[in-house]
Image (cartoon, rainbow, N blue to C red):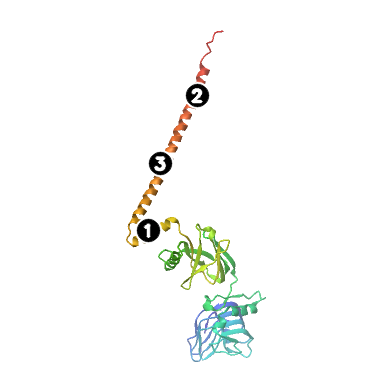
Amino acid sequence: MAGGVVVENKGVIRNTANYAKATASASDGIAGGIAVVNSGTIENCMSIDALSTKENGIAGGIVGKLDENGSIQIAYSAQTAIEGGTTGAVFGTKEETAGAVNNTYYLDTLSGNEEQGTAKTAAEMKSNAFKEELNTLVAGNEELCSWTWNSTKNQGYPRILSSLITEVELVNASKGVTVKGMMHKDTKLQLNELEKKNDIYQAFKKYAEKADKQVLYSAEPTLVYGDEGNLNVKLDLSKYRGKGYKVLVYRNNQIEELEIDKQMIASKDVEEMVPFAVLAEKSELSKTVDHIKDTVKTGDNSSVILLLCIVVVAGSVAGGVIYWRKKKAKKKTKKKNRRNQKRKKKIQKKKDLRKTPNTDVA
């Protein structure tokens, strides 16, 4: 016997997903996505991967053998394959005394009929509409978790939301990044700054050069514990110095430019975190350096000499300012010392006058 979750269920299994491959190697083995034998209740579950038994075996996408009083409610089977002597998309075999099989769905490439449930194409199952259909079935039942959908997760099939999943807002104040969406309550936001040799950074840089701008900051954000469902990402440009901003994201090997509103906020709804970059107008020094680089490529060394002159003059000016400030401070100190000396002499003179006896004759 081989079960993705349990061998035999006599109680209740709910809000459970199986991603395990189950193989019963005996010639008359039984395999089930959730349970091998079910005489209890299985509800709000899903099973994905492959099941297999030998020529005389039994295999079912959710249950291998649906036994007496066993029932299956709100479940879907999207197995890549179910192999064996007797197979079923949702259950392999079913006893006459078994309970109800309601609101079950299976991939139409699997063997099944109306008794097994409703057959759907991969496109139908890998959709937000199917998620909404499942959520309609669990609505109002506090014991059943709701479902979420993200085309990039779970092979595109709906997933069961854990009770630990809630709406979370994550903020990186220094970089002005805010991420909001349904996530694990302990999810953390990390910004991994792109290295200059990174291919994505180079793509951002090339885009910036064409727009006559420079890359102020670029990073690849990640969510520790992973994201759940759709996310809203905002970038507050007031946290950056510069003007003439552009905000870029990198998705599917392409660069997309985001709109910036009047509050200097760029936002986008995404299914997963993507690398981004903030661009701004080049400073005058950056423009000069770029110009010099271009002219050096053409063999004009005069620009190099000009750059050296700029550096020398800038250094001389800085040195002159430091010297002037030191000289001014020294002069101020001398002046203060002279005032203190005069004050001390006046005080001493008054003391001497008090000590001198009065010799006037009447």
The amino acid beneath tag 3 is: Tyr
- The quadrant holding residue 199 is bottom left
Assess disc 2: are there few (<14), some (14-19) or many (≥20) residues with their C-alpha within 10 Å of its C-alpha: few
Question: Residue 23, image x and y in percent?
Answer: 49, 84
Query: Judging from the image, what secondary structure is the residue with disc 1 in?
Result: helix
* Quadrant housing residue 265: bottom right
Label 1 or label 3, whichever comes before in sequence order: 1
Closest to the camera, between mark 1 and mark 2, is 1
Mark carried by residue 292: 1
Tag of residue 360 = none
**In x, y percent, where is residue 110?**
54, 88
Q: Residue at x 51, y 65 (%)?
A: 247
Is 228 situated left or right of 315 in this image?
right
Label 3, secondary structure: give it.
helix
Question: Which residue is at the far right?
Answer: 140
Residue 71 seen in the current view: no
